[in-house]
């Protein structure tokens, strides 16, 4: 099979594209003919060696996929050859990735692709969708009628959180950095959008929502806790899902005296059951058109190193070069 892989961690230029042996199945695995794979920031961290995993070498990069079942292991019960499927949680914890013509995936990390949903939509939504659902439902335990503020509402995860919070019947506030992104968040359904470069977020929240927000979802790699704690209601929750190396100052006083809760989680460490529950809702919302993931470009497998460098400059250097998901069509 053709695959994008590395033989040692390091820069994007380490990625090679070439022939590797087809994967062999264990009893509980599904062999997927990959149609579309999607790139995420975590893929660049793993490839660069910033996430301390022991990687099988050569290591196929990538977390997300959508495709068609080619074969199934002896113990697989949910899928059969010819089924369309999507999934995430690959290229992690010793598992090979998805930027290849074939991928052997444990049955528990695969989900049926609904009729009418494209492989591009399924792959693009996989990791960001599961992440957003885990944070809102499993961690923050949002209730209908609450107010959710999404800091970075125009980004990959942030835009998904905006849409999911609306689907759960919540009022949504989004913050972002320019007028084009403000308008994008409005199109996603945000009830209030704040440009944090031109407005004071905490002041604007107090003006518009005197009672504060119930949940503050933070997407920044280095959170600023001051405006979050100034905006949360009594007993409000803050969700963080990024910033492995971040060491920001923490304002203890306003946090504990307002009975707030700080919730951190890592998507790929969540249980298979929690991720499957997320997939059920994602499939329903994709089918209904309630959830849409913006795609920046669709490239080829040969472009994988270039896509990694582009994603890295956008995520690490904040160069704003990427306005949606980067996909590879096999």
Image: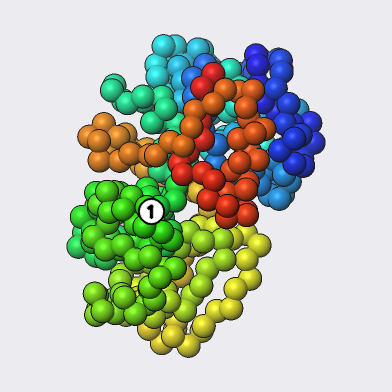
In the rendered image, which residue does mark 1 sit on? 181
Q: Residue at x 61, y 41 (%)?
A: 310
Mark 1: secondary structure: helix
- Crowd around label 1: few <14 · some 14–19 · many ≥20 (10 Å): some
Q: Position of residue 17 (x, y in %)?
A: 70, 22
Q: Is residue 164 visible?
A: no
Q: Quadrant of residue 199?
A: bottom left
In the displayed structure, 282 sits above or below 223; it is above
In the displayed structure, 151 sits above or below 289; it is below
Q: Position of residue 82 (x, y in %)?
A: 41, 11
Comparing 211 with 304, the one in front is 304
Q: Could you tell me which quadrant the C terminus lies in?
A: top right
Comparing 165 with 108, the one in front is 165
Q: Position of residue 319 (x, y in %)?
A: 58, 52
Comparing 85 with 10, the one in front is 10
Q: Is residue 258 left or right of residue 58?
A: left
Q: Could you tell me which quadrant the N terminus lies in?
A: top right
């Amino acid at each position: 099979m053709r695959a994008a892989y590395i033989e040692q961690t390091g820069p994007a230029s380490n990625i090679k594209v070439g022939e590797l042996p087809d994967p062999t199945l264990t009893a509980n695995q599904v062999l997927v003919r990959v149609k579309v794979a999607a790139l995420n920031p975590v893929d660049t961290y793993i490839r660069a060696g910033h996430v301390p995993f022991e990687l099988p070498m050569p290591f196929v990069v990538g977390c997300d996929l959508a495709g068609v079942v080619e074969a199934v292991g002896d113990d697989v019960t949910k899928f059969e050859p010819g089924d369309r499927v999507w999934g995430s949680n690959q290229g992690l914890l010793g598992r090979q990735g998805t930027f290849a013509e074939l991928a052997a995936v444990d049955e528990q990390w695969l989900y049926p692709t609904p009729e009418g949903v494209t492989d591009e939509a399924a792959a693009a939504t996989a990791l960001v969708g599961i992440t957003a659902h885990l944070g809102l439902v499993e961690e923050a335990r949002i209730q209908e009628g609450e107010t959710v503020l999404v800091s970075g509402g125009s980004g990959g995860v942030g835009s998904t959180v905006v849409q999911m919070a609306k689907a759960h019947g919540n009022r949504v506030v989004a913050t972002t950095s320019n007028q084009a992104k403000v308008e994008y968040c409005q199109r996603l359904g945000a009830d209030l959008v704040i440009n944090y470069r031109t407005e004071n977020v905490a002041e604007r929240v107090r003006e518009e929502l005197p009672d504060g927000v119930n949940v503050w979802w933070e997407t920044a790699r280095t959170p600023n806790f001051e405006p979050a704690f100034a905006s949360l209601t009594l007993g409000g929750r803050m969700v963080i899902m990024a910033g492995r190396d971040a060491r920001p100052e923490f304002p203890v006083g306003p946090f504990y005296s307002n009975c707030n809760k700080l919730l951190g989680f890592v998507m790929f460490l969540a249980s298979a059951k929690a991720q499957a529950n997320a997939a059920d809702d994602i499939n329903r919302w994709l089918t209904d058109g309630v959830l849409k993931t913006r795609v920046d470009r669709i490239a080829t497998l040969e472009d994988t190193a270039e896509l990694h460098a582009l994603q890295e400059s956008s995520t690490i250097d904040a160069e704003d070069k990427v306005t949606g998901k980067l996909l590879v069509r096999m």
